[in-house]
Image: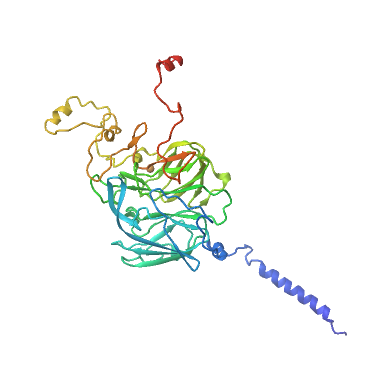
Amino acid sequence: MTKPGRMSLYVPLTVLVFCATLLRALPANGASREAPQTPWARTERANYPPGRPGIDYTPVVVPNGATLAHRIRKGVKVYHLVSRPIRHEIAEGFVVDTWGYNGRTPGPVIEAVEGDRVRIYVTNLLPAPHSVHWHAVLVPCGMDGVAGLTQAPISPGETFRYEFVFPEPGTFMYHSHHDSMTQDGLGLVGMIVVHPRHPVKRKPDRDFALMLHEWDVKVGTRRPNTITMTDFNVLTINGRAFPGTESLVAKLGDRVRIRFGNLSAMDHHPIHLHGYAFKVVETDGGAIPESAQWPETTVLVPVGTTRSIEFIADNPGDWLMHCHMTHHMMNQMGHDIPNMVGVDPGELDERIRRILPGYMTMGQDGMGHGAQMGMPIPPNSIPMVGRGGQFGYITMGGMVSILKVREKLENGKDPGWYRFPQGSVSSMATPEELRADGIE
Ligand SMILES: [Cu+2]
């Protein structure tokens, strides 16, 4: 008998090791399943440096609003939100006593870049406990900001620290998650814009962030009523009602992105833009693949969501942008009044004026004429509709703004009313025109 050589021993040993490795790789029950990767793992691992404005992203434009300032500490963007009672102007001559962040409602936009590590301090100067939820941002559970569920409420006078990495680019929101009906209702809401780290297509030239909200403020009062469930009478874009809304300004040829967020209490808002067909490119769940985008002229922004639209500003002019719910295009409209449309008051006005000087029956031909006539209104209130335009009175209020597209712009400043090319404005038909076209 001869002893086995070295070579003949190695061969069975190698086969054994190979088989063991193979066995370990096969799942015991036949169903291969890896532990899921947390949403933030990829960007956290990438360890990105803080994104720089003007280099890594084009900052958003916030009409009537602001962006939250930050400082950088050892590679972390540090922000500070302060919730407290504020006095806020919704339109000229109309202020409310409400709650907000850093002196405003909505709070300033938190702007960052995908993969940015952020530390957000929240100081609560409200008379009630508070917490902040980072709506639709995929954070670790302990940073989710739900008082009682994921953290202790922030008591009045306390400051809490939130820290996380923004894992995905997109349009998100922040709002109170303690007594949301009262606190969100009083204006403790704001938007979050996270720009992509490596944009795959042309960045927007004009990138607007707009928060939609609704309030119930009885005429002549200052305190929004958050117990209301249906009768909202003040509709705002970035905390302002038309004619207090700042126009959106773009240059001819700009790629325009408009990010809408809706933290109204009870209403979705179908936002309609005149003069353009756009694509809905993103929800707060992420970007919509190009193959799944379809053209729209109205985008429904449901409560608790964001919708971003994009288009090329190729049609110059003053283009109305508004919620298409007609009651959302009014200011402080009362709804418990009789229907007067078509009523003939006869001598009623004259007879009532004998005991009530200045009395006038209204509403027989609608709501449009009251403000036009410059009727006196109670202190701290706004006329139900409008402002003067270059062709007369604009009979709208509430959730209304104007997109102004111009060939030339001065530093993005409001260029005033559009100067229409001669002969391009609809006007009264002449008898000759009517005759020529056979219109009686
Ligand atoms: Cu609406």
Q: Position of residue 373 (x, y in %)?
A: 26, 33
Q: Position of residue 25 (x, y in %)?
A: 67, 68
Asked whether, in this view, residue 279 is left or right of residue 10, the answer is left
Q: Nearer the viewer, residue 379 or 132?
A: 379
Residue 36 visible: no
Q: Nearer the viewer, residue 152 or 242?
A: 242
**Quarter of the image containing the C terminus?**
top left
Asked whether, in this view, residue 24 is left or right of residue 417, the answer is right
**Quarter of the image containing the N terminus?**
bottom right
Asked whether, in this view, residue 10 is left or right of residue 159, the answer is right
Q: Nearer the viewer, residue 153 or 416?
A: 416
Identified at 51% across, 49% down, the residue is: 282
Tag count: 0
* Vertical comparison of 353 with 400: above or below: above
Q: Position of residue 330 (x, y in %)?
A: 32, 39
Identified at 41% across, 59% down, the residue is: 133
**Ligand 1 image position (quadrant):** top left
